Image: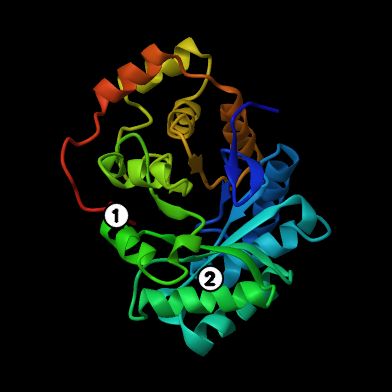
Amino acid sequence: MTDNMMQFCGTQLPAIGQGTWYMGENAANRRQEVAALNAGIAQGLTLIDTAEMYADGGAEEVVGEAIRGKRDDVFLVSKVYPWNAGGKKLAAACEGSLRRLGTDTIDLYLLHWRGGFELAETVEGMQTLIAQGKIRHWGVSNLDLADMHELMKIDGGAGCAANQVLYHLASRGIEYDLLPWCQSHKIPVMAYCPLAQAGRLRRGLLADPTVQDIASAHRATAAQILLAWVIHHQGVMAIPKAATVAHVEENAAALNMALTAEDVSRLDNALPAPGRKVALDVV
């Protein structure tokens, strides 16, 4: 398949997975979405990321249908709403996700973003879910460096297995401090919206002249260049959403791309990282 593998929760996984945001919102698209996820699994994109938030659980149901009969072939990630991230609410939310996914265990369960529950209560609840065998690992999403420092001071906080944040070539704020910190602590970063939602978050990103020129040189698409750029960073996995088989195949092919040092330098110069701390970018 590829050399672009990474150590993730004790498992060797490809550095590109499958996102599911906006899946499950329209029943007419369900067959196509299930087919896309299955195509991704067949291409080796075995990590699937979802959340109870996505289509109010609808995305989890799509994933559940896609992985029926092949649960052991995939690494499942889901996320809990912040207002469900403690006590009995956390237990009930996890049960709901398990039911919709059609499985008895989630491989990685993330706090979607910070809310009213104290991090200590969320960590305690996550540890209970692990002890019960309902999840294998827990992590966080949309937490910046100060949040991570706070988390590490909590009893059990060092058990955090990943941080999922927005990251793409035109949104590089995490490179100032959060990404280096995660790398030094060997906490994988999951980059959501690695294509800036097909350019919607940053208009013109896919059409950027430098991106286009490098894509042409590699006989690749702009999207493949953007994915290759994200995953060339140590400890970073990209989780693009692809609702069609063609897009899944395009994403999977990016695993076999190798950007040159000159390519990376040109991209860095075209869309440079900020030289100071900026607020964590979220959508």
**Side of 114 relative to 129 (left or right):** left
Q: Which quarter of the image is occupied by the N terminus?
A: top right
Q: CA distance from mark 2 to mark 1?
A: 25 Å
Q: Is residue 195 above or below residue 118?
A: above
**Which element carries disc 1, helix, strand or loop?**
helix
Residue 74, given in percent of the width and then of the height, sits at: 71, 52
Residue type at the position of mark 2: Glu
Residue type at the position of mark 1: Leu
x 45%, y 14%: residue? 260
Task: Please give the residue where the numbered disc 2 appears in the rendered image.
Answer: 52
Q: Is residue 147 above or below residue 73?
A: below
Residue 209, given in percent of the width and then of the height, sits at: 32, 19
Q: Is residue 172 above or below residue 65?
A: above
**Which element carries disc 2, helix, strand or loop?**
loop
x 73%, y 48%: residue? 38
Q: Is residue 47 above or below residue 76?
A: above
- Residue at the extreme right: 69
Residue 13 in sight in this render = yes
Q: Which image quadrant for residue 137?
A: bottom right
Q: Which image quadrant for residue 65?
A: bottom right
Task: Please give the residue where the numbered disc 1 appears in the rendered image.
Answer: 145
- Residue at the extreme bottom: 88
x 36%, y 59%: residue? 142
Q: Which image quadrant for residue 100?
A: bottom right
Q: Front-most of 185 and 28?
A: 185
